[in-house]
Image: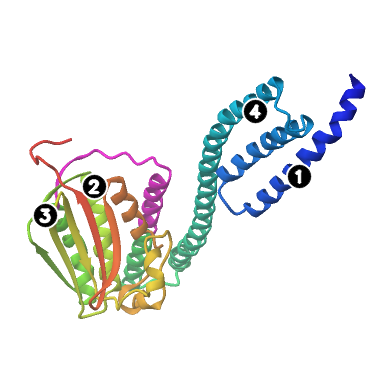
Amino acid sequence: MFTKLTHIAPYAVAFSLPVAVLGALALRLLRDRSLTTAMTVLVLVPLTATFVGVLGVARFMFSPMLTTTLLICVLVAAVTVPAAIVLGRGIARRSVWERQARARERAAEASRRELVAWVSHDLRTPLAGIRAMAEALADGVVSEPAETHTYAVRIGAEAQRLSAMVDDLFELSRITAGALRLTMSAVALRDVVSEAVSAETPMARKKGVRLRTEAQEWPTVLGSDPELARVVRNLVANAVRHTPADGAVAIQVGVAGDEAWLRVDDACGGIPPQELARVFDVAFRGSTARTPDRAHDGPAGAGLGLAIARGLVEAHHGRIAARNHGPGCRFEVRLPLVVDPAVST
């Protein structure tokens, strides 16, 4: 038996080895193709090598045993090749998902590092001011009632700014952690817009910016009132902040199909095209085209308002986008309408 095996083994190797070599070359040539293709070739190469080796040993003399062996090879191929295709597609999908997950993790980590850098700087600025003014008051450097009052007002303003930054960070952390829970109901956009305009009117007047509201109709949307109010106020505040004196901010509302739309147009001078895709990123402030005039507007904040607006809009199954329009930028929000305003969900 051993002598017989040593006699036929060279023939089997001689016939199957070229097939294996060709299969290795095929895999090398197909290395840039899909994983499914590679898996199929990996299954076909040993099956084909076995098939050719059996034929070589039998010297192409089709005996009943050889016919049975070849039939078994064909049946095995009929089962294993489709299985390899299915397995390859599954592995390919998993690989793509893992690559996308790693890319998202890297982007999130980069965003977190950028956020920490921005916020660390922005927190130090008001804290340093508060500390300096508090020390001046404590040391008696400032003693006149008018000066004392001025310092107290400035300390209050800086403390309010810090509080707003902490609130923004808390809201953003809820959004990014998926911990945001909305109580959905029918919300009238008229009330939301009116509240935002009223809140931002003092700052607009201080800067000399005109606020204008236009509505084709006032729709009712499905959403959470506090969060939608924050979205609109963030957009209006951002527009006022970046609009120069004597400019105008327009808030427009309307309906398109089964969606309500809200547009906020400013006069910021536009956003460079390469930056439009990043305006909703955390801590992104852009170039000098949208840098506010600090003489009129004061600190620009931590750059979280638009990121929060995007997170809240997406939590409402809506969309938000930005583009250059006229003398500035247009931020547009689309939200699902309430089919029956009398019914809350």
Image: 14 above or below 170? above
Residue 72 placement (x, y as % from top left): 64, 24
Mark 3 or mark 4, which has the lower sequence index? 4
Q: How many marks on residues?
A: 4
Mark 2 or mark 3, which has the lower sequence index? 3
| Residue 301 in view here | no
Circle 2 or circle 3, nearest the eye: 3
Image: 201 above or below 184? below
Q: CA distance from mark 3 to mark 4?
A: 74 Å
Residue picked out by circle 4 = 73
Q: Which mark is residue 18?
A: 1
Q: Residues within 10 Å of mark 3 (few under 14, many from 20)?
A: some
Between 221 and 235, the one nearer to me in the picture: 221
Q: CA distance from mark 2 to mark 3?
A: 14 Å
Say what amino acid the circle numbered 4 marks.
Cys
Left or right: residue 331 versus residue 175 is: left
Q: CA distance from mark 2 to mark 1?
A: 72 Å
Magenta stretch, residue numbers: 162-190
Residue picked out by circle 2 = 226
